Amino acid sequence: MSIIYSKKYNLHNNPNHIENKNRTEAILNILHEKGIIKHLEVYKPKRAKIDDLKKVHELHYINYIKEFCKKGGGYLDFDTYATSYTYDVASLAAGGAIEASKLIINGKKWVYSISRPPGHHATKNKAMGFCIFNNLAIGLENLRNKFKNFLILDFDLHYGNGTAEIYYEDPSVLYISIHQDPKTIFPSCGFIDEIGKNEGEGYNINIPMPPNSDDNDYIWILSEIIPPIIDDFKPEIILIEAGFDAHKRDPLGSINLTEKFYAWIAKFLRKFNLPIMCVLEGGYNLKALKYSNLMFILYSNPELLGMDQFSNLRILDGFKEPKKVKIRVKKLYSEIKSIISNFFKI
Ligand SMILES: [Zn+2]
């Protein structure tokens, strides 16, 4: 596995905000502490150029962010801060996804851009939810000459409304998001009837999970939905918006995932034998964030997983796929299936 990371992400920081430099630091620290980092290929990102940002964002928005930061920054909306460094650092985070896409073009099978600020709430012309530029979309646009069919899976606690909106009318990008029911959480959209529009109708799939859903609920419903969709849509690559705020210890949500889910999802994704490009999104409890990332990275690397020195970290040994889940999760699945079966064989 290759990771892409820069210390410069720390320059976009507000110690009084939960989206701060300690997040990526915590992930890198645990990779060092557990001796994992020396088994990974580590790359540094370059700042995305305006031409790259323009593939996703409107030029007036890019210039607005640039000017806003030049004047010293402040709050772009009620919860999204910027500092004088933010334009440069957000361009670097977008550059992380571009670097990831280049590694994929060069034949790497699994790449992970451990970047911040996050991106999936950023729309073409609006910063929101701690996000400035839509990192994953900017990386995806660099892959247009290589692939025709893209599948995005977003397992952040929140609906990635920015990414969904960018590809809402685009049938070449199938966006699937599993998130906490937006009736109960930001950004108040991401319901099952938001299916895409015009040419893109059917290519936006939402799985809004009830509060208190756990590993079993997530694993069961993803196992039911993802494989038949992949069989039918036939993506050439899977792009992951990897958020870790659906962990039970995270302060923002009411979903009860544990590290086991993040190990499982990596193992699950490996089965499809497609290139995987991941970008970090949320996750605000540092302990949950670092251990969940450790498991996600370990389980995406079969060679690492097989090494004796990491045998004590194998948390899925003896794990059984769930047979029983909450009735309301089964009901949700039936509702989603009745909608998406109009577009895909499921
Ligand atoms: Zn989130």
Image (tube, rainbow, N blue to C red):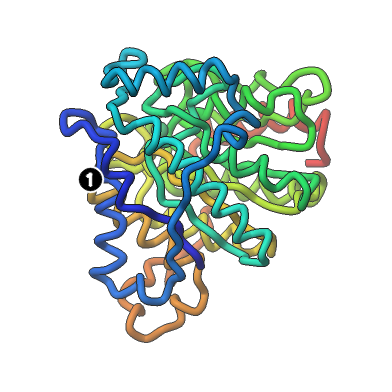
The residue under the point 52% across, 75% down is 302
Which x, y percent locates residue 13? 24, 35
Picture quadrant of ligand 1: top left
Task: Estimate how packed mark 1 is, as few (under 14), some (14 to 19) or many (20 or more) residues with alpha carbons within 10 Å.
Answer: some
Q: Is residue 327 visible?
A: no
Q: Hey, which residue is sitting farthest left in the picture?
A: 16
The residue under the point 70% across, 51% down is 227
Image quadrant where residue 270 sits: bottom right
Which x, y percent locates residue 248? 31, 41
Q: Hey, which residue is sitting farthest bottom in the picture?
A: 308
The residue under the point 75% across, 48% down is 228
Note whether 148 is above or below 74 in the view shown. below
Closer to the camera in the image, 297 or 74: 74
Note whether 213 is above or below 69 in the view shown. below
Which x, y percent locates residue 112? 49, 56
The residue under the point 62% across, 34% down is 51
Q: Residue tagged by mark 1?
A: 22
Question: Is ligand 1 within 8 Å of the beta carbon of the residue shown at mark 1?
Answer: no
Count numbered badges in the picture.
Answer: 1
Q: Can you say which quadrant of the picture contains the C terminus? A: top right
